[in-house]
Image: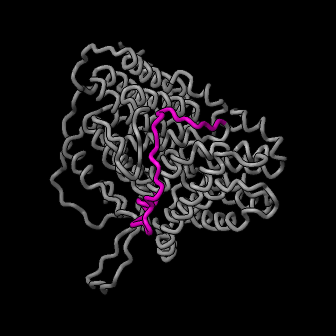
């Protein structure tokens, strides 16, 4: 069965903001329809053989480097991008024109620095050596601009997509997949261009050029997606569609088209559920129990996390995700001390997977107050979750103390973010009534940590495929009724303007937090159910409607 064809590339696709929005709005639904058409094939068990894996477009001549001596005096950014630097001081003109930050020049010194014991990093060193070698050796790019945008995606965007710990899904799995797919390479170039346009808007340097390139290549990539899905076998097509849907979700989210982004990713998860029977699988991010033939564990991990985030949206919480995977209990498995931040993050993610059906009741409690008396669920699940969170915080304490020794590092950003998630999770589980003064100590610590994070020079105010400090700040607004606390949270959120964490938008959360300061919680119920009032931040559907057709 063939999916509906994508939109033909239009002449006005890249003309500024409106042109790019037009491409986004018209073709994103067709991306979802392509995936849904493939899902229909799986559901009906159509075994018609398809052609071998192929990529659209004709091969171009491989790029070769001119026989010129390499310069060792260029700026660090141009060296990283592998382009010739004009060596302007204090910043080079080439970086300025391309719209990226020039990181300056290495200081040459013949003096050997004194040896000293350096603290062990809490996060693994982020190196893309293997993917870099693979891409340079085999990938074909049509022109220098396309190649430069891909390099920006590889060297910058992939590092920004994970807010806490590096994720191989971005700097290994996806980059390797680009070797075999022109459509994926076009998608990576388009999202890199759109990301650069956001960064350069403040200075108006090449912003329109970046957006025009993004629009042109996004439309081209979406047409290529249809071809590749319809000419691959079921397993290859599903894997490709899942990887492509992550990039489409990123692009649509940067555009502010949250409804399109969520609709598309839900279609991809629905296809994943039916193709790989995820509802029959037990899943654990700390123990590999859901490995799927033909699909990397990293792909399973990112979709399990997205499923959990979407099912926990404030306006329409659900105790059932689209993938319907069963999460293993981690009771008794938390170590005395975490080895590094990645292990701590994995345990926090797993705790949230298990706790989400229980925590989904939080919005109702915020509006209506805690229930009278206690239920069997509260008597059993609540204490278990609270015990696990306290053990997590105990195992995490040494890492947090170590991160405090380097408050300007990426380690500190990751550790502070995890500490806030641990605090707000414990606050949520406790579900104590909103009496003046409650949770002030925890809220004060969260404000201090998040303020340090968002003002850190390493903090990126862009899109990430993770929950960072934004959910912690919003839930603190809900849980702590102190007006002074809420005002400080709004101030911190304003400092984070531009930050997007999956469905969490710093600007929208700040607006909502300000409304909470001025309204009685019971008067907010219609507002929280109205998706238009939320600016697309959350979906205003109940769980049955949200999952209909999936």
| Residue 244 point in image, percent of width and height | 39, 34
Identify the residue at horizontal 70%, vertical 50% (top origin).
Answer: 510
Nearer to the camera, 526 or 435: 435
Judge whether residue 337 is colored magenta: yes
Identify the residue at horizontal 83%, vertical 50% (top origin).
Answer: 518
Q: In the displayed orientation, state which residue is furthest to the left.
A: 67
- 388 displayed left or right of 338: right
Q: How is the image coloured?
A: one colour
- 345 displayed left or right of 70: right
Identify the residue at horizontal 39%, vertical 50% (top origin).
Answer: 158
Magenta span: predominant SS is loop
Work out whether 116 lies above or below 266.
Answer: below
| Residue 402 point in image, percent of width and height | 47, 75
Work out whether 527 lies above or below 98.
Answer: above
Please state, as top left, top right, bottom left or bottom right, where the N terminus lies in the image.
Answer: top left
Q: In this view of the protein, can residue 497 be seen by the observer?
A: no
- 513 displayed left or right of 461: right
Work out whether 16 lies above or below 286.
Answer: above
| Residue 314 point in image, percent of width and height | 65, 41
Q: In this view of the protein, can residue 520 be seen by the observer?
A: yes
Identify the residue at horizontal 69%, vertical 38% (top origin).
Answer: 534
Nearer to the camera, 199 or 235: 235
Nearer to the camera, 215 or 55: 55
Highlighted magenta segment, given as a residue range = 316-345
Question: How many numbered discs?
Answer: 0
Query: Where is residue 301, by image quadrant?
Result: top left
Work out whether 417 lies above or below 53.
Answer: below
């Amino acid at each position: 069965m063939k999916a509906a064809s994508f939109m033909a590339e239009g002449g006005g696709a890249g003309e500024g903001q409106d042109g790019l929005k037009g491409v986004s709005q018209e073709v994103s639904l067709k991306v979802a329809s392509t995936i849904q058409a493939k899902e229909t094939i799986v559901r009906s068990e159509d075994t018609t053989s398809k052609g071998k894996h192929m990529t659209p477009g004709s091969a171009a001549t491989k790029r070769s480097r001119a026989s010129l001596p390499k310069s060792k005096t260029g700026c660090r950014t141009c060296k990283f991008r592998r382009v010739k630097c004009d060596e302007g001081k204090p910043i080079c003109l080439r970086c300025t024109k391309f719209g990226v930050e020039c990181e300056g020049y290495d200081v040459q010194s013949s003096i050997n620095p004194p040896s000293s014991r350096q603290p062990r990093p809490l996060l693994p060193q982020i190196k893309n050596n293997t993917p870099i070698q693979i891409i340079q050796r085999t990938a074909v790019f049509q022109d220098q601009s396309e190649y430069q945008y891909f390099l920006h995606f590889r060297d910058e965007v992939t590092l920004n997509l994970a807010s806490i710990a590096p994720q191989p899904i971005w700097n290994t799995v996806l980059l390797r997949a680009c070797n075999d797919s022109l459509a994926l390479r076009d998608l990576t170039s388009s999202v890199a261009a759109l990301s650069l346009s956001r960064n350069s808007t403040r200075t108006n340097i090449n912003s329109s050029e970046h957006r025009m390139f993004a629009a042109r290549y996004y439309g081209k990539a979406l047409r290529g997606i249809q071809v590749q899905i319809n000419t691959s076998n079921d397993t290859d097509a599903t894997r490709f569609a899942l990887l492509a849907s992550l990039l489409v979700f990123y692009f649509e989210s940067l555009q502010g088209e949250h409804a399109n982004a969520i609709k598309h990713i839900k279609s991809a998860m629905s296809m994943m559920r039916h193709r790989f029977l995820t509802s029959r699988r037990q899943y654990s991010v700390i123990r590999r129990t859901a490995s799927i033939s033909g699909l990397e564990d990293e792909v399973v991990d990112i979709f399990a996390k997205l499923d959990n985030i979407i099912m926990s949206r404030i306006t329409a919480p659900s105790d059932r995700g689209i993938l319907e995977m069963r999460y293993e209990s981690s009771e008794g498995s938390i170590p005395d001390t975490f080895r590094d931040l990645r292990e701590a993050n994995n345990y926090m993610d797993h705790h949230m997977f298990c706790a989400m059906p229980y925590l989904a009741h939080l919005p109702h409690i915020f509006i209506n107050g805690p229930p009278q008396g206690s239920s069997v669920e509260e008597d059993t699940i609540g204490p278990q979750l609270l015990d696990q969170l306290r053990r997590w915080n105990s195992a995490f304490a040494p890492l947090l103390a170590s991160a405090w020794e380097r408050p300007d590092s990426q380690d500190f950003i990751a550790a502070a973010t995890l500490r806030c998630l641990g605090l707000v999770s414990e606050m949520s589980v406790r579900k104590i009534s909103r009496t003046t003064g409650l949770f002030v100590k925890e809220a004060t610590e969260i404000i201090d940590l998040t303020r340090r994070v968002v003002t850190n020079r390493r903090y990126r105010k862009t899109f990430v495929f993770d929950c960072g400090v934004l959910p912690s700040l919003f839930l603190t607004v809900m849980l702590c009724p102190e007006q002074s606390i809420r005002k400080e949270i709004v101030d911190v959120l304003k400092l984070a303007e531009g930050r997007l964490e999956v469905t969490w938008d710093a600007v929208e959360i700040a607006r909502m937090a300000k409304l909470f300061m001025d309204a009685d919680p019971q008067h907010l119920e219609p507002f929280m159910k109205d998706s238009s009032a939320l600016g697309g931040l959350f979906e205003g559907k109940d769980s049955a409607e949200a999952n209909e057709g999936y």
